Image: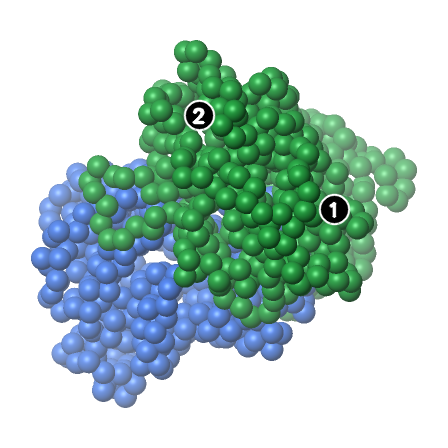
Chain colours: A green, B blue
Amino acid sequence: MSDHIDGPRSIGDPSIDTTDLFTFMSPENPARTVFAADVFPSAGSSAVFSDAANHAIVARRVTVAGLGDAAKFQPGEREIRFSFRFDRLEAQPGAKPIQRGTCTLPGGQTLRFVVNDERGATTPDGTIRVFAGLRSDPFNLAWLVGALKPFQNLLEHDNVLCFLVDVDTKRVLDPAEGSLFGVIAETTPAPAASALVGHPPRRFDWVGRPEQTNVRLNNAHLGPVDDLRDLWNQQTPFAIAPEAAPLFRKRLLDSLHQYDMSDGKEDWPPAQLAASANVFLDDFQLIDVAKPTTDTSYLEIEKSTLNGRPYQTGGGRTLNALDIDMLLTWLVNRDREPLHGGAKQATQLGRTTFPYLAPPNTELQTVVESVAVDAPADKVWALIGPFGAMWHPLIAQIRLTGTGAGQLRTVETIDGKTIIERLDSTDNARRQYRYSGVTGMGASNYTGLLEVAPKGSGSTLTWRVQYLSDGQPTIIIKTIVATLQKVGLESLKKRFG
Amino acid sequence: MAQTAELVLERVAATAGDIAAINLESARQRSWNRFWRAPEQPGIAELIVEQEQLTAQFTGDLAAFDRLEMLANDLAQREPESVRSALVAAQVACSTHRFAHARQSLAVAVVRGASAEVTDRLALTIDQATGTDLSIVLAARRERSTRPGHWQERIPLGALLADLGDFAEAERTYLHALRTYPDVSPFSLAWVSFQLGVLWGESATVLQPERAAKWYRTAIDYLPGYVKARVHLAEICLDQGHATEARALLEPVLASGDPEVAWRLGDIAQAVGDSAEAMLQLAAARTGFESLLAIHPLAFADHGAEFYLGSGDDPARALELARLNLANRPTLRAFEQACSAAQAAGDANAAARLRREASERWGSTAAFRISSLARI
């Protein structure tokens, strides 16, 4: 994943785990530039920012200091820093608590905002606008990267916590002084009023180009090697420690070579591979704010420079770029032949208006119940396996329409409700059937699985239902489903022991 | 001991406990959804194990154990030959104290090629929990705790030192852990603080309830919903005659379903003379313990025995559970509990036999010399 869960430490508090960084020309106004960073991979609908960390987006002006095998991007010393701090939760009578935050701008000015307020906050002159809140994860990870196998988007329906700045390019970034920038996002410890004790790390996590940690530094095919990701995450962006640089360079070289050879063809001669490793070692996202960015311009600046010619686009990384496809294509065959993941886009496409990242996805709800019974799996399956079987005490009547996959069952419950469900598949060998809801549950994407598995001399029944709330509060549907499951499974426990 | 050092230790900066708890629950639910959508996704089952263990440990949501069992069963069915199904089975069995099963699954994981880093860590956990080769475990814990990026190792090291009777070093280890904490998650900080509370409130040769209470309060400060810390602090408050404070600690976490909460609320009601309320709460605790014991007997045998030795007032049941726990993990603490239960049940022969067995197994250790078994 781009930078999702990229070190053992991140698991302790996922809200400090920087997952992604996007840099692009605003689709709303070409005179503006957007830097958007995400934390908290796979954040649920209630996720909130940590109040103990600084969240920052930092840009430095960069110059092209070498081409071809000497490719080099040299960052300047001056930082343009946007720092976000988040407050503790504020209780709201009769409502969910809210969280507020403060963004400190490069000149020291501050902007207060409310998390999840899509309007964000804007400086009085409109130069800078900021937003922070839960959004749909724009990253499309449609690969099992370790196996280089296309797959469904592993982040489908996922959300992230996003913090972003939308700036007037001319006033804030002054492209006349140099329009090429390197950008990173980071989380660092926030100084506490009670003074820090011990030796807090200088940095929790940071991200420049996507996949530095999880793909390039942590390549599973390199065998039993040390996990360098936490060490990397504690490096200072734009200034990797000289004593650690050879270690990272060697790992990058080994990893890039492995990717190159993964299709059995060498597309990267040693000198060019070394140049590529050096470019990736300087890990910041490159964007030329004087040129347009597009969904295909990601990495163009690096590629052109490594190929010994001037770059043509703004580079950057847009929300809808298929960057993992582009990256793997570049690493494996140096753009000889495009590689495609198993999904063409993220769960939701980025928007053309502020705050650009799509609203959070509705949480897919899962309700699972299981019970162990003292009867062989085949015996239990004989009772409950038929789609129209009458075994549930809360069901008064079932009518079947059709046969096999696609068969409909109209269920009348003992309290007078009507539910219609469609059989999707039956697997008698695995003693399971899958079905989906047609009407009657007040939910969409409603699917169910009923399964019997042998366990010792008895068996275990599992009944799983997933749905998106649609028309009724989640908790009501959850209660109805859980009651159906519990009563049904308890009746089987009584019957079989 | 290092009281001076302890006194100057200030609160370590961490994410607010309510935010961390919300985010844990948020991430846990999301992980399950991802698992059901693509169970083959690398790392997702392992992440769920970690999140459910945190949930059980810190929020008192003991249904986490049921969900862990479900995960292990599901994986065993989907991937009967995989490394991760064996590893998850071992981790889940360890979480529910089915140590023999955990060892079997771990052996299978090793045969299937699981990484030594993971299997060694789990093997250490099992050995420590069952009191197996503790000198080897101690050496390994010491070595691992010095490795870069292995801060978390310091907590089980401290717990082992306390079990072995080296309370001074246990405390130093915990305090050092607090001073060198590299993260902002409050869970581990709350855990270390809780362990320091246990050290002073239950383990040390000379118990210091005030000092223990201070650490339990620190744990709750880091994590207001930390059920176990509230239960332990409420016990101290009640012992000191502060029934109102004890009740205020427990009532907010009654909904967690942890039967220890009802147990202590019953004790409080008893102490203030409200017999009807006491009966209600203790009945709820009894039902709660028996429900848990019906599903996870080994995980709750020692807690159940403790309950029946106390307000549960059923020494025979206590002895039965204590024996179950002892057979599962013959630690010195398990011997102490079983012996107390035998005495309470009026079975002097069993008590004598247990003392003898304990002496044979643990007699040469420093911990035995300061244990209640040596004093009898």
Q: Amino acid at mark 2?
A: Val
Identity of the residue drawn at 52% across and 30% down? A178
Identity of the residue drawn at 46% across and 66% down? B94
Front position in the image: B317 or A28: A28
**Residue A210 horizontal/vertical position (percent):** 58, 45
Q: Vertically, is A488 above or below A59?
A: below
Residue farthest along the top direction in this orientation: A125
Q: Quadrant of residue A298?
A: top right
Q: Is residue A249 left or right of residue A77?
A: right
Q: Secondary structure at mark 2?
A: loop
Front position in the image: B245 or B345: B245
Label for residue A341? Answer: 1
Q: Vertically, is B148 above or below B13?
A: below
Identity of the residue drawn at 87% across and 35% down? A401
**Residue A110 horizontal/vertical position (percent):** 35, 22
10 Å crowding of disc 1: few (<14), some (14-19), many (20+): many
**Residue B365 horizontal/vertical position (percent):** 23, 83
Q: Is residue A55 visible?
A: no
Subunit that carries the residue with mark 2: A
Nearer the camera: disc 2 or disc 1 = 1
Q: CA distance from mark 2 to mark 1?
A: 33 Å
Q: Is residue B285 left or right of residue A255?
A: left
**Same-subunit check for callouts 2 and 1:** yes
Q: Quadrant of the C terminus of chain A?
A: bottom right
Q: Is residue B370 left or right of residue A327?
A: left
Front position in the image: A132 or A454: A132
Identity of the residue drawn at 41% across and 35% down? A79
Q: Vertically, is A315 above or below B33?
A: above
Q: Which residue is mark 2?
A: A115
Front position in the image: A426 or A329: A329
Q: Is residue B362 visible?
A: yes
